[in-house]
Image (spheres, rainbow, N blue to C red):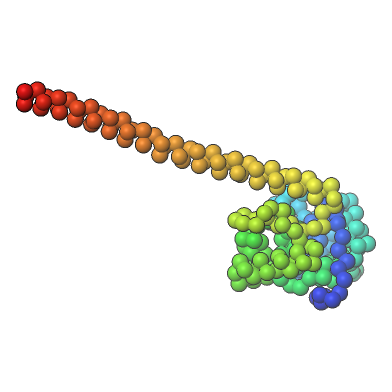
């Protein structure tokens, strides 16, 4: 499997959802189950529709998969090969098409299979394809992909910053950005509500303490009045 250098031009372009999923499956299976790679059409469909490590869930059939594979072959991102028994199989050309190396490929594959993710999620999930030493190593790879115009940040820097690949068609990307912004707004509202609810008990305790202090002061006033009467 060849890898491109930074001097080679990137050939990547937006792909349909089915084509992105299948490209991710081809790269993933080449890394995780090399004995069963290249993949038959049945394996491509099974990998695309599996319940684990996928978001969103898909239900591709033969026609969907063949159309997506044609799209990938025309783009130069996948190839059709002859397997044993002359069965048609498929393999990716992601390294050349995207212009990436092994760690970059692992991150891109996870973004293709699961959509937008944080650095922590990418480190955990991509580790089955490439062992990242720490979070800083993942951040460095993501920054390299951003420089190659393959990845972008969907949320501002800080805790929980989310990243996505840039192979979405324009309309789908607009929907994705709106979805992420809506989720972020909901989380901010939830955090604010939690802060208010946490502050409420504290305020209640202060009120109780003030009430007790008022009671003590009243008792002191009564005692002082009695003492004054006795002195007289």
Q: Is residue 174 left or right of residue 226?
A: right
Q: Quadrant of the C terminus?
A: top left
- In the rendered image, residue 25, in percent from the top left (x then y), is placed at 77, 61
Toward the right, the furthest residue is 74
The count of marks equals 0
The relative height of residue 17 versus residue 201 in the rendered view (above or below) is below
Q: What's the residue at 70%, 47% (across, down)?
A: 180
Q: Nearer the viewer, residue 14 or 45?
A: 14
Q: Quadrant of residue 72?
A: bottom right
Q: Is residue 191 visible?
A: yes
Q: What's the residue at 81%, 75% (across, down)?
A: 6
Q: Nearer the viewer, residue 143 or 15?
A: 143
Q: What's the residue at 85%, 52% (across, down)?
A: 169
The relative height of residue 175 versus residue 224 in the rendered view (above or below) is below
Q: Is residue 12 left or right of residue 34?
A: right
Toward the left, the furthest residue is 231
Q: Quadrant of residue 157?
A: bottom right
Q: Is residue 127 left or right of residue 74?
A: left
Toward the front, the furthest residue is 232
- In the rendered image, residue 179, in percent from the top left (x then y), is placed at 72, 45
The relative height of residue 228 versus residue 24 in the rendered view (above or below) is above
Q: Nearer the viewer, residue 131 or 217?
A: 217
Q: Quadrant of the N terminus?
A: bottom right
Q: Is residue 125 visible?
A: no
Q: Is residue 199 left or right of residue 140?
A: left
- In the rendered image, residue 78, in percent from the top left (x then y), is placed at 87, 65
- In the rendered image, residue 148, in percent from the top left (x then y), is placed at 79, 67
């Amino acid at each position: 499997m060849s890898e491109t250098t930074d001097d080679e031009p990137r050939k990547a372009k937006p792909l349909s959802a089915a084509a992105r999923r299948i490209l991710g499956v081809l790269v993933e299976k080449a890394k995780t189950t090399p004995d069963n790679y290249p993949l038959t059409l049945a394996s491509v469909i099974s990998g695309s529709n599996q319940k684990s490590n996928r978001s969103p869930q898909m239900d591709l059939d033969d026609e969907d998969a063949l159309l997506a594979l044609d799209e990938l072959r025309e783009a130069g991102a996948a190839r059709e090969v002859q397997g044993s028994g002359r069965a048609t199989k498929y393999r990716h050309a992601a390294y050349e098409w995207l212009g990436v190396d092994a760690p970059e490929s692992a991150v891109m594959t996870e973004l293709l299979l699961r959509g937008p993710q944080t650095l922590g999620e990418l480190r955990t999930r991509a580790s089955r394809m490439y062992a990242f030493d720490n979070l800083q190593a993942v951040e460095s790879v993501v920054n390299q992909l951003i420089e190659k115009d393959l990845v972008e940040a969907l949320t501002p820097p800080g805790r929980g910053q989310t990243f996505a690949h840039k192979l979405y068609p324009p309309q789908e990307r607009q929907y994705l950005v709106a979805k992420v912004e809506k989720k972020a707004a909901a989380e901010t509202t939830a955090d604010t509500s939690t802060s208010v609810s946490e502050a409420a008990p504290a305020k209640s305790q202060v009120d109780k303490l003030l009430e007790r202090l008022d009671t003590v002061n009243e008792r002191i006033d009564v005692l002082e009045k009695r003492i004054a009467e006795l002195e007289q």
